[in-house]
Image (tube, rainbow, N blue to C red):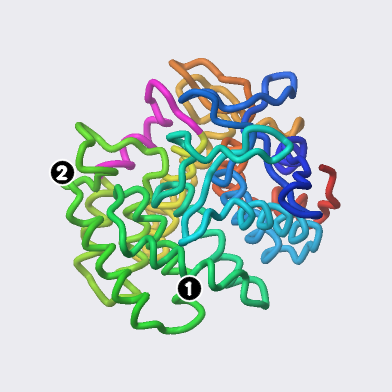
Amino acid sequence: MLRQLAALTRRLPAAGPRALALAVYSGSTGEHFEARERGVEGVACVDDAARACVLLIKLWAATGNDALKGWADGLFDFVLWMHAGDGRWHNFVYDWHGTRNTEGPTSAAGVNFWQARATYALAEANLHFDQDCARAVLTEALASAASASCPSDVRAIHAMSVLVLLQQAPDPWLSMHLAAWCDELAECSRDGMLMNSPDERDRPHLWGHVQEAVLADASVVLGRKDLRALAVASADAVFAEVIESGFDLPHVHSYDVQSAVFVMDRLAAVTGERRYGELARKARDWFDGRNPAGAVIFDRVAGRVADGLDDGRLNDRSGAEANISAGLALIDDSVALSKAKSWSGGW
């Protein structure tokens, strides 16, 4: 998927001499096109750049390949350039000249997904890079998160940022907010399942649903067995049957599957139960055809990940989110790591 991400990567000189951004969508023949799901949104966004930063930082940490760090640095410059002040971000640029979308509902500054993902990318950069990476901006971002209400799936990413930072050093302020945010996640539940927002009905959607992973990890950091028990019960209810079925759902995207992999991996680590590791393996196998359509989602020869399955049919577009999500889900794959180690650039 690094090849496809490289094909989606373009320079954005308006954001700085080394700044890079990712084209949001790519057609089956490789053409790029803008996001228009909620009006004209733009050609590239912080959401994707921040997540790609996290992927590349993790790959660099695992391989030592400085080409990956340089790529992450370029995306990081774009993320910082899109900072709107006060720890909040605009999300999209309308064009490759760098015209910011400042008013659109998927781009206006606020405490939302792109703010949370930018915050998480900053936290990962501060953990892995031997320097303070825009620490003042990160401090503002966490303060903005703490002062605002937001849905549970967004709050979970804030909590992930804090968990990363607490790996560096103890911090009473961070621990206090981690505990409060975990209580928020715990309260947003129905029938034993952690929900993504109070307005969600029936079962929670899997896209970006990582609350169980957050509570499992926080249970260790905070010494709270109640969080672990809730994480286990919800994960069994939300994910287990879906994973066993090969994600037999009307619409399945890479990010749904990556979320399932992440939750199962964290539960395996925290509980020591082998069944969660097995569920994580089965979830990863979705990319190689373990799904009701028998479709190969990750074409390892072409180096591209399809956008997903819609009503059992392969959506053969290959956008940024699909490839980033697959990369994060498969980051421990030995073949993927060997390719990342030898990566030499190419955008």
* Residue 305 makes an appearance in the image: no
Residue 213 lies in the magenta-colored region: no
Above or below, 182 relative to 294: below
SS of the residue at dot 1?
helix
Residue at image location 17% in from the left, 47% down from the top = 192
Examine the image and state in which quarter residue 63 appears. Answer: bottom right
For the point 31% across and 63% down, the residue is 147
Question: According to the image, label 2 marks what residue?
Answer: 190
Q: Amino acid at mark 2?
A: Arg
Residue 178 visible at all? yes
**Residue nearest the viewer, comparing 149 with 246:** 149
Residue on which disc 1 sits = 165
Q: In x, y percent, where is residue 48?
A: 58, 43
Callout 2 environment at 10 Å: few (<14), some (14 to 19), or many (20+)?
some
Q: Position of residue 334 (x, y in %)?
A: 68, 53
- Between 101 and 230, the one nearer to me in the picture: 101
Where residue 162 sits, quadrant-wise, is bottom left
The answer to which of 6 and 172 lies nearer the viewer is: 172
Range of magenta residues: 237-253
Of pointers 2 and 1, the one earlier in the residue sequence: 1
Q: Tag 1: residue type?
A: Leu
